[in-house]
Image (cartoon, grey):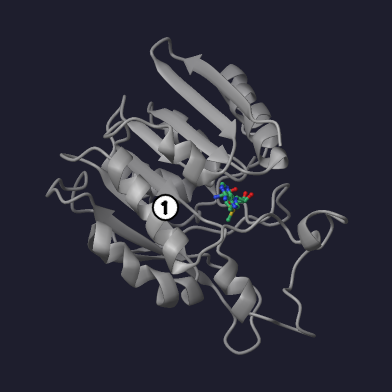
Amino acid sequence: MTEKHFKTKYQKEHTVTISEEDCIKFLKNLPDGSVDVIVTDPAYSGMNNKLKLGKGRIVGKYNNKGQEDSKWFSEFHDTEENYELFLSECKRVLNKSRGHIYIMFDSFSLLSLGHIVRKYFDVKNILVWDKVNVGMGHYFRRRHEFVLFATNGNTSKIKNHSFPDVWRIKRIHQSKYPTQKPVEVFEVMISASAKPGYTICDPFLGSGSSAIASIKNNCNFIGCDISNKSFSLSKSRIENFIKNGKDELQEKSACLDNETNFWK
Ligand SMILES: C[S@@+](CC[C@H](N)C(=O)[O-])C[C@H]1O[C@@H](n2cnc3c(N)ncnc32)[C@H](O)[C@@H]1O
């Protein structure tokens, strides 16, 4: 695989940098304490191993024929050993006096891997993203994901006391990138934990939603993804958003019309 890097500036002083590479390799190249907030949504393989729906298949689009078993995308090898390596690198790159981390989990990976996060960080909350509309599921149909919020051994607070631990934000339908999350989910995390000029990091970039949320909050951003599709879609999305303020992968707001946005 040829690695690709893209760096751009906005509002003169802020930077956005993305690369096409493996998360561990990418984190290893970042200096100690160089990141203020990590917001990330890893591709867990555990869920797919345990969640065989239908005739032993994962429900979803298998449309990348010939690639990686025709799955949606490469999965991070989430053995406990690899996950510990990932978390230890997150800890090293995160600022010691104000560093916060948000890691997204499905129910299965929260049970199998979530407890390990406590070895590295002070877990403060298990947050729930309520997607408003139900998705797949053979028993109870899934409508939520978890977000684990932790600090890097410091006592730095979030912005204020108005943030609930359940976030009602509509899921994205018919996305151009599999498992694309609404920008608003990352906006909640960033507005709770960051100030303008902070550096936000996402080592599982996907469609670049976390980068767009960082730009909206006047933060610097660094991220990576192992997939070329992720890199090229995110690059174009970031460039166009900076140029004309239009988000080409999420045209509509994912907020509910009748609710005030608690994070604004
Ligand atoms: C759940 S998706 C992220 C979706 C993203 N939050 C969004 O809103 O579009 C997980 C991503 O992890 C990437 N990935 C899988 N293994 C990886 C690895 N070893 N290093 C970096 N990225 C990886 C996949 O290509 C996929 O884009």
- All told, the count of numbered labels is 1
Residue situated in front as seen by the camera: 163 or 57 = 57
According to the image, label 1 marks what residue? 86
Residue 245 visible:
no
Up/down of 77 relative to 137, above or below: above
Residue drawn at (54%, 73%) of the image: 143
- Category of crowding for the residue at label 1, using alpha-carbon neighbours closer than 10 angstroms: few (below 14), some (14–19), many (at least 20): some
Residue situated in front as seen by the camera: 237 or 70 = 70
Residue drawn at (19%, 40%) of the image: 96
Up/down of 257 relative to 235, above or below: below
Viewport quadrant of the C terminus: top left
Up/down of 240 relative to 106, above or below: above
Residue 138 locus on image (x, y percent): 66, 87
Quadrant of the rendered image containing residue 32? top left
Instruction: Provide the secondary structure element on which disc 1 rests.
Output: helix
**Kind of residue at badge 1:** Phe
Viewport quadrant of the N terminus: top right
191 sits left or right of 171 in the view: left
Quadrant of the rendered image containing residue 195? top left
| Residue at the front extreme, as displayed | 81
Up/down of 62 relative to 55, above or below: above
